[in-house]
Image: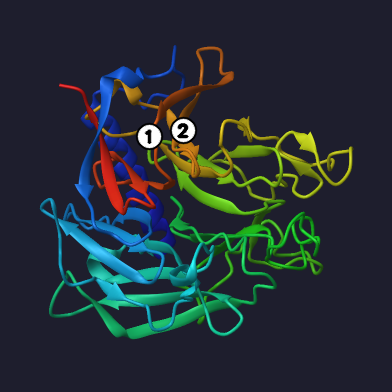
Amino acid sequence: MRRLLVVLASALLMTVSAAAQETEPVINREAAPDSNAVTFTEVASGLFNPLFVTHAGDGSDRIFVLEQAGMIYVIKDGQRLATPFLDLTGIVSQDIRRGYSERGLLGLAFHPEFADNGQFFVNYTGGQGGATFIARYTVSAENPDVADPTSGEILFTIGQPYPNHNGGHMEFGPDGYLYVALGDGGAAGDPLGAGQNLATLLGKIIRIDVDGEAPYGIPEDNPFVDNPNAQPEIWAYGVRNPWRFSFDRATGDMYMGDVGQNVWEEINFQSADSPGGENYGWNVFEASYAYAMGTPPANMVYPVAEYRHENGNCSVTGGYVYRGEAVADAQGAYFFGDFCTGQTWVTYRDLSGTWQTERFINLGFSLSSFGEDEAGELYVVDYAGGRVLRMDPVN
């Protein structure tokens, strides 16, 4: 029954969103949005290595910013609150304080029913070996701007053989299940062969039911649930280090950025009606190009967008399909960028249904994440500069 209610609520949300725009959701576009028509407005600063910005979906219009070292802050009424929403620095890997690291507090997702149950989930690395942990926390009963630090409950953990490629992003899908990105375990070239190995959760997108039996349930329609040689949590595989995926709030389609190895960065797409089980090719292929061998797997799904390591570009940051109202020209365009240069692109389907990708704007800073607020407005996160900015129209 709860699952049905979530699906119905999601369908209602899509209907309301479409009605608010007085048009059907934009699926096909004639051309890319005009980069000269937008500006990026700073909404928060003074952060330490921020990695993500999101909202709670509770009608409060707050946004939440995640710092890699373990802090989560609230931005409310245009101001960052001095007291953190949650401080996990005591349990999160602190490698970042000694220099560049891919470990730390990497993901944050609010339960679809957060307004009622106060539950949210974090994804972090910790412990002596830097294992990945997914934990559930609840908001304080006394103050909605502060979480209860004693409420932590670990749902999931997996060892990380190397310190990089931890993935870390989490998001609830339109179906009410929690999707989690797990990298291939690290080093270079996937030495463990995790990407194509269904017996491990590394190199996968997993899908779990956080409202099922403790510590979590396995959705009965997961694609490999009846395969004795596969982990039942797996939703999709063949990924190297997925860095931010999202669901189009109007269609339910999934878009995913996957960080490449030597030459290519990629954006993968999964239709909302997919039964799961997609193989995105790593480490046999890197984007659309052979890596470990020249023949792609028979069931490989090719990316809808890709770009080379050139002009300083080095690591893709997945983003969102724009569904806000402030920049009408951006409707239906998927925004993504590069962590190293801040170059951004838009990907969209043209009037014939063919995928097109065009450069949008170079932000000029280390782009660690995109984000959305409750209204669907788009945000970007400046990792080294410690800022969060919102995409606004040029007046």
For the point 27% across and 36% down, the residue is 17
- Direction from residue 161 to residue 85 in the image, left or right: left
Above or below for 327 versus 146: above
Q: Quadrant of the C terminus?
A: top left
Above or below for 167 versus 251: below
Dot 1 or dot 2: first in sequence order is: 2
Question: In the drawing, what numbered circle is on residue 343?
Answer: 2
Residue found farthest to the front: 98
| Amino acid type, residue under disc 1 in the picture | Leu
Is residue 1 visible in the rendered image? The answer is no
| Amino acid type, residue under disc 2 in the picture | Gln
Residue found farthest to the right: 294
| Residue picked out by circle 1 | 363
For the point 49% across and 58% down, the residue is 169
Location of residue 147 in the rendering, given as x and y in whole percent from the top left corner: 25, 76
* Mark 1 neighbour class, 10 Å CA radius: few under 14, some 14 to 19, many 20 or more: some
Location of residue 343 in the rendering, given as x and y in whole percent from the top left corner: 46, 33
Q: Quadrant of residue 114?
A: bottom left
Q: Quadrant of residue 132?
A: bottom right
Location of residue 302 in the rendering, given as x and y in whole percent from the top left corner: 70, 35
Location of residue 59 in the rendering, given as x and y in whole percent from the top left corner: 18, 54
Is residue 194 visible in the rendered image? The answer is yes
- Direction from residue 345 to residue 239 in the image, left or right: right
Give the camera-side residue of 233 and 126: 126
Q: Marks 1 and 2, how far apart in space?
A: 6 Å
For the point 82% across and 46% down, the residue is 284
